[in-house]
Image (spheres, helix red, strand yellow):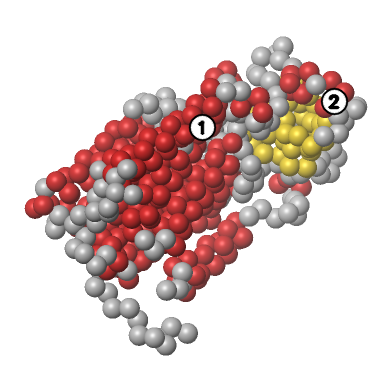
Amino acid sequence: MTPEARNRLVAIGAILVAGAALGWIALGNMGENLVYYWKPSELLAQGEKAYGATVRLGGVVVPGSVQWNGDHTSLTFQVADTHLPTAAKVTVSATETPPQMFREGIGVVVEGSFQSNQVFKTNRLMVNHSNEYKAPHDGGMPGDWKDTVTQAANEQ
Amino acid sequence: MPFWSPLALLAVALGLVITHFAVPTTRAWMWKASAVVGLGALALLLYLGLIWAPPEAFMSDVGRILYVHVPFVWMCMIAFTLNVGCAIAYLMKKSWRTDALAESTAEIGVMFGAGGVLMGSIWARPTWGVWWDWDPRLISTAVMLLSYVGYLAFRSFTEDPERRATWSAAASILGYVSLPIVWFSVRWWNSLHQVQSTSQSLDSQMRIVMWWGTVTMLFFLFAFVVKRYEIARSRQSSALEAPPEAPRQEVAA
Amino acid sequence: MKPFLLSRPVLLLSLWAARALAEEAPAPVHPAGIEKAVPSGVIEGGWGYVYAAYTVALAGLVFYALSLWTRRPGAQPPPPGDTP
């Protein structure tokens, strides 16, 4: 075999292996094995199996559900699958000061564990924002952010 | 962004590189022009990004990181795509030129990629609340960059130019699998990183600055590729006793 | 050759950027005003992060260009004993 033929064989082999690997990841069921976070409905569907394990829960902060304790050192809120009122919800109790972008209706990912009292305890609260970048209207505080996040949640 | 915009960028980058090699008269001046125009564009980018563009509704001024983070990561992906093109070209038809160009684009891709990840991390702290989290986009990007660091390490540790060229080309093709995974990771799996912005999800002023940043970095990418290529070529000629224009013809193995 | 990432300008610059970031990072637990702990949903300030990111971008371009210059074909390698 000439070096040229060997090189071409290497190329074909590498392309085949690369294509197979990509196809396996893209079309296989990797989505079920590689889970970054669970949505509330998925967590609740696990039933008692979900208790205690350290997992990530992701969803939308339910408007009107954010409650701080007296000295603002911890808060509870509900996380829902989507913005729809009927979406599955899980109550989250967080001891960490949330990022500044935390607000009602925004996406969050919390890391912690689901307790048997149906509360998800977390000390790592992350804001999961959408791909929207808009200038604030009138240069002031945005007044219509609820529309923006609703739109973002519906896109998911 | 329209889905074809990264492909259009790639076409421009490819056009510049091909022109540089196909038209000898452009070799002396085109990279210089690119660097000079890039410097001017960079100065304007600082003005556009830091002053002219409006703050973001929720991120305020922190949203300005968009204009450097996205262009850097895009240049990384363009460089790696040029790299895999050179790798396939080398294996199909041996040439020290495509081998040198592959080395050049891989190193530049790692530089842009590392910068982009660093800026992303700085951006993540005030917005997500963490410097880093192991979400699919961040994991796949880390794997991609590490695989190209490994590629460069393999190249620098392998003495025999023939072996280096052949096996690094194979590694390049295998490593390139990571790139579509990075691109689609935010769609295939749920992640902390948001999906790619679209024309609708980005205010027009912000879109202009992001594109300005991208074009700016494209000028630098081209100038860097040319200069790094020359370094790779001169190292080849000192490594090979024979004039490096054609690979040495081995007896059939 | 000494790794480029360990060169003195790179180290100094990263130190500076790290300090800018440290000044910007929020205090661990709400210090004086307790209301500060309740986020408004909109980031206040944060220019330190912006400057740090743009510094990374500029530093990447400048130092990569410098590294290309020092490695240029025909550049004389530094005489032995020149580097500490």
Residue A63 spot, x, y in % from top left: 70, 23
Which amino acid type is marked by label 2? Lys
Write down the quadrant of residue B203 in the picture.
top left
Where residue B2 appears, x then y in whole percent? 36, 26
Q: Nearer the viewer, mark 2 or mark 1?
A: 1
- The residue beneath circle 1 is A21
Label 2 crowd bin: few (<14), some (14–19), many (20+), radius 10 Å:
few
| Residue B109 showing in the rendered view | no
> Which is more toward the observer, B11 or B169?
B169
Residue A85 visible from this viewpoint: yes
The residue at 71%/46% (across/down) is: C36
Q: CA distance from mark 2 to mark 1?
A: 32 Å
Question: Mark 1: which amino acid?
Answer: Ala
Q: Nearer the viewer, residue B90 or A135?
A: B90
Residue at which label 2 appears: A49
Question: Are dots 2 and 1 on a single chain?
Answer: yes
Along the line of sight, which residue is nearer the eye, B184 or C53? B184
- State left or right for residue B67 relative to residue A30: left
- Which callout, 2 or 1, points at the residue further toward the start of the chain? 1
Residue occupying the point 67% across, 28% down: A33
Q: In percent of the image, x 73 and y 21: which residue is there?
A: A42
Determine the residue located farthest toward the bottom in the rendered image.
C81
Chain of residue at mark 2:
A
- Which SS class for mark 2? helix
